[in-house]
Image: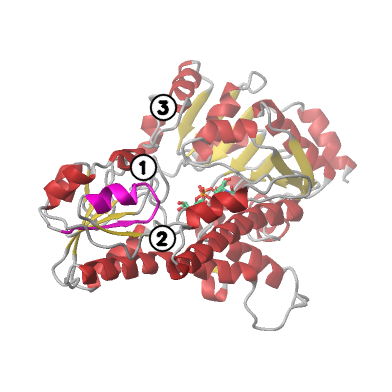
Amino acid sequence: MSSRLQSIIDTRGPIRTVGVIGMGYVGIPAAVLFANAPGFESVRGFQRDSPSSGYKVAMLNRGESPLKGEEPGLEDLLGRVVGAGKFRCTSDFSQIAECDAVTLAIQTPFKDPKDLIPDFSALIEGLRAAGRHLSEGTLVVLESTVTPGTTTGMAREILEEESGLVAGEDFCLAHAPERVMVGRLLRNIREHDRIVGGIDDVSTRRAVELYSPVLTTGKIIPMTATAAEVTKTAENAFRDLQIAAANQLALHCEAMGVNVYDVRAGIDSLKGAGITRAILWPGAGVGGHCLTKDSWHLERGAQVLGHGDLWYPHGAESIFGVARKINEFMPRHMVHLTLEGLKRTGKSPEGAKIALLGWAFIQNSDDTRNTPAEPYLAAMEEAGAKVRVHDPFVNDYPGIEVSHDLDEALAGADVVTVFTAHHHYASLDPVRVKELSGREHPVIVDGRNVVDPDAFIRAGFIYKGIGRGDRNSHPVAP
Ligand code: SAJ
């Protein structure tokens, strides 16, 4: 622990001004909650003035949220902190010099999972901007999910190179990973426990000072920066693994003619001391910015930080890698179910009309990052089908026309495929859908168990559902 750094912090006093780099799903709610905390005088949101996202600066300064999906409380709180002059967004990164603490909430996708190469270009740019305007005693926090070893390694090096200062001596550095889900951003930040990992004790304490005021029921869990990185990547890798186990079980249930949802309810019923049954939900695939890559960050950490000391058969796939492959397989399984359904109507995919319901990767959101619907669409178009996409939340997507008109999307459809469990689809009326399709036996492929198979079968549909071995070979209603 550096007494020098502690005395710099003591001289600087409590954190008053906060900067948040990256105005996205993580940065915007974080900045608004910092601004809402009475102890912080002002919060700056830093956003590059790029063609794709520069528009956010003016929008945020008008108190409007650029995030489209349902985000309870966000727009109100944003309006209040902007109105009170506590939050302002800017693309002038030199104002970082006025901040006591700076957080980075920037995307960290993977360029090539096969060779475990992440794309840290946006993060590096953010770190360089922070480093260029860093002053003694500033706290820098990485909120982005990163490969274990990044905070004490690459991030530290770049910040020191740009600032000429030394982490742990002249400024504080920590990792405090975000744990938010779209649709409940504010609640997650307030209520989830916060993992806080400094590169040293002074940094950890300073980061605890930053996050404590925004927590309501959540508590701080302090640890080292690298342990915090492993915690974050591992909790997502475990979730991906649990989903993969549910998906594998669904495939087995289809083969055995059993309803996976009955089995799931049965397994879930075993409760009691020492018994944790976190069986998740099978489905059409795993999307989003997190589960689709964080296993690879964990794998890379074990490789890089482990310096080859990973005592595991060389070249053997880790369970996290296998889980990724199972979840990546599910959209292809949706293709299989679609082709099987068409076959039952004596049709081939060539020229078939498909209504794809749900483009967002998760229900009741506009978030389309790594949507599992995309590989399905590509495969069906390759098979010669015409696919119309409907999603009530998604306005636009490069190269894809997304309709908000459900009747128009369903008109003339040979197949209706449900990819996202938006609440709109729970009330699909089989008689109405059949009318719109105009087919004697349209096919319905349910990737999220949102429709009642029997109601659709009675209406003359060919039904196919993930994990519904009990219905997927049903007799066709006359
Ligand atoms: N999914 C399933 N079955 C399930 C749960 C999810 O197929 O039982 C699918 C969803 O449809 C979606 C994908 O997985 O396509 C991801 O869904 P998610 O509910 O995991 O949503 P994320 O990725 O936004 O949130 C995860 C969460 N991680 C954990 O719970 C460990 C969240 O807490 C993290 O903050 C977030 O990743 C992140 O940002 O890392």
Element on which disc 3 rests: helix
Q: Tag on residue 61?
A: 3
| Discs 3/2, front | 2
Residue situated furthest top in the rendering: 84
Q: CA distance from mark 2 to mark 1?
A: 24 Å
Q: Is mark 2 within 8 Å of ligand 1?
A: no
Residue 307 lies, in percent from the top left, at 75, 74
Query: Marks 2 and 3: in contact by CB < 8 Å?
Result: no
Residue 288 lies, in percent from the top left, at 46, 53
The quadrant holding residue 340 is: bottom left
Q: Can see residue 112? A: no
* Disc nearer the start of the sequence (2/1): 1
Q: Is residue 100 above or below residue 81?
A: below
On the rendered structure, is 332 left or right of 387? right
Name the residue type under label 3. Answer: Asn
Q: Tag on residue 16?
A: none
User: Which residue is label 1 attached to?
Assistant: 422
On the rendered structure, is 410 left or right of 454? left
Residue occupying image coordinates x 12% and y 57%:
439
Please report the bounds of the magenta region as a residue range. Answer: 441-458
On the rendered structure, is 385 left or right of 245? left
Residue 230 lies, in percent from the top left, at 70, 57
User: Which residue is label 2 attached to?
Assistant: 470
